[in-house]
Image (cartoon, rainbow, N blue to C red):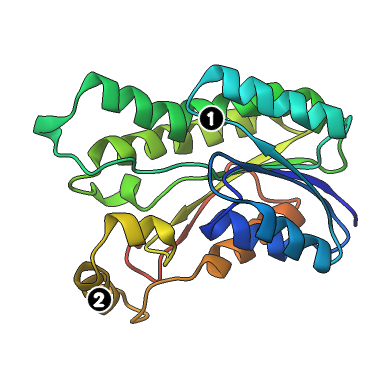
Amino acid sequence: MQRTILITGASTGIGAVTARRLAKSNTLILHHNQSPIESVAREVRELGGVVHTSQADLMHEAGCRALVRDVTHVTDHLDVLVNNAGSLLERHTVENLTWSLMERIFSLNTFSAILLTQLCVPLLRKGNLPSIVNMTSIAMRHGAPTATAYGAAKGALDSFTRGAARELAPEIRVNAIAPGVILTPFHDRYSTEEKLASIASDTPVGFNGESDHIAQAVELLIENTFITGETIDINGGLFMR
């Protein structure tokens, strides 16, 4: 089935790999902020997809609205919205959190996904078996010292997922994925090699994840029309419930 899919944060890591996995026969609108997107777009085309790109700063309302305007210039409907954009921004303790940092963390990781969902609902309602996939984090599960606001922001998005799933049913399904430690540029910036090795040794499967482990789950949530309001934990057993 050919789909029209918007993926935010698609230039690197999970977003880029998800774009490649969903490329074949689909139309992808790939959002990026400042990271180059050309190589991802080229690979999507080589894999048989149609691709459009849009640059926007999702930390601000204006950027979210600009992205959706770009989408409407490309298509009159969406089948899938993947709210993948997000970042820790900087490590912090509870004692050194500032109001400005909290605003930035929640704006990027929570508010942008909520606003994009709202703005895309009219497009999704015109789509075929439409669905939304939100990207949360294991940080909301286990406390995440030095990432407490980030974990809280992802926890808020997790709660929003369930609320939106109920409100938008039965027309639009809404689900989330909570990745564990996935080897992406995120951890190149925020984690040391020693810390990553320690986490891998503590993980029941014995290794850290790759972006395609998450992309496979995105594909599952798009395809399986009997799943909504669910958050899938993909972390190698690091968190179990």
Kindly identify the residue that appears in the image at 76 percent across and 33 percent down: 170
Q: Total of numbered circles in the picture? A: 2
Q: Amino acid at mark 2?
A: Ala
Residue 77 against residue 206 in the figure, above or below: above
- Disc 1 crowd rating (10 Å Cα; few below 14, some 14-19, many 20+) is many
| Residue that badge 1 annotates | 58
Determine whether, in the image, residue 2 is placed left or right of residue 96. Answer: right
| Residue that badge 2 annotates | 197
Residue 221 position, x and y percent, is 67, 54
Residue 88 position, x and y percent, is 34, 43
Residue 33 against residue 35 in the figure, above or below: above
Please say whether residue 1 is visible from this viewpoint.
Answer: yes
Q: Secondary structure at mark 1?
A: loop
Q: Nearer the viewer, residue 113 or 231?
A: 113
Q: Nearer the viewer, residue 226 or 204?
A: 204
Q: Amino acid at mark 1?
A: Leu
Please say whether residue 167 is visible from this viewpoint.
Answer: no
- Disc 2 crowd rating (10 Å Cα; few below 14, some 14-19, many 20+) is some
Image quarter (top left, top right, bottom left or bottom right) of the C terminus: bottom left
Determine whether, in the image, residue 161 is placed left or right of residue 165. Answer: left
Q: Secondary structure at mark 2?
A: helix
Residue 187 position, x and y percent, is 35, 60
The earlier-in-sequence mark between 1 and 2 is 1
* Mark carried by residue 180: none
